[in-house]
Amino acid sequence: MEFRNLAIIAHVDHGKTTLVDCLLRQSGMFREGTLSQECILDSNPQERERGITIFAKNCAIRWRDYKINLIDTPGHADFGGEVQRVLRMADGCLRLVDASEGPMPQTRYVLRNAFESHLRPIVVINKIDRPDARIAAVLDEVLDLFISLGAEDTALDFPVLYASGKHGFARRHLTDTNTDILPLFEEIVKTVPPPRGSPDNPLQLLVTTLDYNDYVGRVAVGRVFEGKVREGQKVVRIAREGTQHPASVEILYAYEGLTRGRVKEAVCGDIIAIAGVEGIGIGDTICDVAQPQALPPVPVDEPTLTMMFATNTGPFSGRTGKYLTSRHLRERLWKELESNVALRVETTDSADTWRVSGRGILHLEVLIETMRREGYEMIVGKPNVIYRRVDGETCEPIEHLTIDVPGSYAGAVIELLGARRGQMLKMEAKGDRTHLDYTLPSRGFIGLRTRMMNATRGEAVLHHGFHGYEPERGAIPRRSGGVMITTETGRVTGYALEGLADRGVFFVKPGDEVYAGQIVGERGEEDDIDVNACRKKKMTNIRTSTAENTIVLRPPRTMALDAMLEYVEEDEWVEVTPAECRLRKRELNESMRFKARREARKVES
């Protein structure tokens, strides 16, 4: 049996899942009706909600005398740690593009890495049955994209197939009439080179992904580059730093369709999973005992954004979360490091505070949201960009941004991006919509999605990816007003909010529980003020005999996690719990905050 290892590079909603579904069905591996899951590859809850691929996944298809290993790649630069690892397992890539939307910027990062790895591309223009399909123009856009990413001449001579995953066909020419996906199978076998290596050579297996199983513990996924591996075989594990550790392969898995099953032996070229190797980590090499030789570890891009994580010190701590202590938080962050190689966690002077750095705001946001859903409580600080010195100049990370928006909202979008130091690359009309290309500092992207949706009434389609480091572009305006901080712990009353209505906008509503030091609203003036959001109406004999007035309040401003991360300042925390997120001051005590403000004014003067 021959192997073909293929990475799938596709933007969300371009038909990746449907196409893989067709390949699985038409390979004959599954009966009709057995593939019922709507998203085969994007199975993580956050992947479905956010519409992005976060974690790389594998599936295997047997077709004739070939086993085709399909590797789903994260499309976002924030998960570049995953991208660079999984591409090491592939020998070719399948670039899937929507026949109407064309190539999107989020996949530029993956493509650039694919070309740097010298992977041969196959281009599939999908959804050619769409009424607004612009097939020839999209093909030109793909070619322009490949050239701009520095593709080699061999990569520019790529095969093109025209497909409809919905109707289950792939065609070499638009005039063809076949109704199956056979041409795609044939092109994969023809274009993607067979894996190098020989089963007679000493074993070399590179670990690229980690999984966990409740029964067997840590499971390492990787590709066998040389030799073969058997269940029960004695091996040597060479860690990333070069140290050697004797080990044994207790359980061996191979991929079949969407699942993996136990096998007795696997040979070079296959993508497998092993269990029972103590201490195994990403980037480790599993070698033959007689001739241990490490494979080069996968390089990973350095983080671009950092923020502080700490244990929740608020008075409501422990109400909804299961994991609250510094030990819980430290163990969870260190566990994340085992599989999330692009993440960095550093200790600080405080035993219950850590500095966590990632590839972007989305990378860190997904980590916070995952931990929140697992039952963790924590407080996180303001995200800060990690600057670099390049040729003696301070440089910051820059994102490449693409927006499609109705023409009537283009002005609002341009104004919003201009305030965040965005630089326009291109602007063109596509029917009644406007297409905008921008470069934008990474710090300008924090909270941008929420503001963009508000400015365009939810009609903007926004995609972004890492562009590179450029000289710092200057200050980005933060919030202009101060905040209102409650001085009492209890339930918010309508009476209190009515009395404060002319002070600003509230983040809470009557009946919400708040505590002293929590931020309950924003005011129009610059300084912060302390308010009592729990003040009750004092009842007198006169008042009890008179009718109550109806209180009319404006609806509170609600903020998602990403909006809170943009809003928070250096002296504030975002409190994250399984039930809700809150904004609070680092110092909850009113008199201590007053002293700190007074000291700050002395320093300034």
Image (spheres, rainbow, N blue to C red):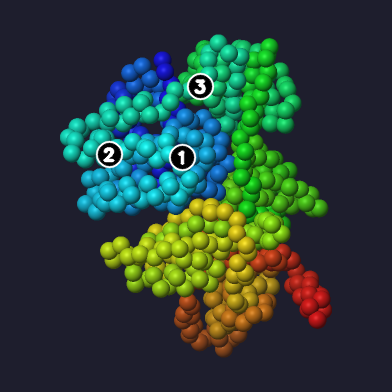
Q: Earlier in the sequence, mark 3 or mark 2?
A: 2
Helix, strand or loop status at disc 3: loop
Within the image, what quadrant is residue 485 found in? bottom right
Q: Nearer the viewer, residue 586 or 439?
A: 439
The image quarter in which residue 323 lies:
top right
Q: CA distance from mark 1 to mark 2?
A: 25 Å
> Do we see residue 297 in this rendering?
yes
Question: Residue 249 appears at what percent x and percent y?
Answer: 61, 17
Quadrant position of residue 315: bottom right
Q: Callout 1: helix, strand or loop?
A: loop
Identity of the residue drawn at 61% across and 77% down: 481
Image check: 428 left or right of 485?
left
Where is residue 398 drawn, in percent x and y? 56, 58
Q: Which mark is residue 152?
A: 1
Residue of label 2: 163
Q: Could you tell me residue 223's position as x and y percent?
A: 54, 25
In this orientation, does residue 532 appear? no
Q: Nearer the viewer, residue 100 or 550?
A: 100
In-image side of 311 versus 197 (left or right) = right
Do the CB atoms of the residues marked 1 and 2 lie less than 8 Å apart?
no
Indicate whether 440 appears above or below 180: below
Residue under the image location 45 percent in, 28 percent down = 5
Give the residue at mark 3: 196
Q: Nearer the viewer, residue 368 or 68?
A: 68
